[in-house]
Amino acid sequence: MMAGDKQFTHNSGTILTGSTKIWDIPEASAKALFGCKRVFIGAAGNADSFGRIVNYVWLPEGKPPKLNDVEMLLLNDKGELYHATTFSNWLLLKDPFFAIGSGMQFAIAAMASGKTPYEAVKIAAKYDANTGKGFNKLEL
């Protein structure tokens, strides 16, 4: 499972509700980019990069876009979890779970205590002011 909150914070400090920070990548793109049938990607950080991420993974043509101040998690149908800050530096994580974003320590602690990723992001929202405004989850 991959889960995320919907809170976006503008440079001015204004808090917005977005639609999602996690995406179920189309099978053709998952195969072409990652060699898998099913891939979820989640992002945290500068939301200006989120559109570049989505556009590239939906239509992976040309060079990967440059991303600024963003990090991503990738979960594939093999159960592998990867972390990256660009499309060329995917690091395979051997931990059973991980989190990104400002509430990551709270979410990791919750998952270490047996909570699902969805439950963990809700717990993180209770303690991190930059996490919240609703939640999404994707399940393999």
Image (spheres, rainbow, N blue to C red):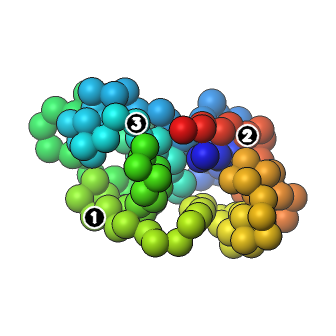
Answer left or right for 86 relative to 78.
left
Q: CA distance from mark 2 to mark 1?
A: 27 Å
Residue 31 drawn at (x, y percent):
25, 36
Q: Residue at x 40, y 36 (%)?
A: 38
Earlier sequence position, callout 3 versus callout 1: 3
The residue located at (16%, 32%) in the rendering is: 61
The extreme left residue here reads 62
In this rendered view, identify the residue nearer to me: 57 or 39.
39
Residue type for callout 2: Phe
* The residue positioned farthest toward the front in the image shown: 78
Q: Secondary structure at mark 2?
A: strand
Residue labelled with disc 3: 38
Judging depth in this view, the residue of 126 and 107 nearest the camera is 107
Disc 2: CA contacts within 10 A as few (<14), some (14-19) or many (>=20): many
Labels 3, 2: front one? 3
Amino acid type for the residue under numbered disc 1? Asn
Residue that appears at 51% across and 47% down: 42
| Position of residue 109 measured from the top left corner of the image (x, y, whole percent) | 74, 72
Cα–Cα gap, marks 3 and 1: 20 Å
Tag 2 residue: 135
Q: Is residue 70 left or right of residue 28?
A: right
The answer to which of marks 3 and 2 sits earlier in the sequence is: 3
Q: Which mark is residue 89?
A: 1
Identified at 61% across, 46% down, the residue is: 1
The spot of residue 115 in percent (x, y) is 78, 59
Residue type, mark 3 in image: Arg
Q: Which residue reaches farthest right?
A: 126
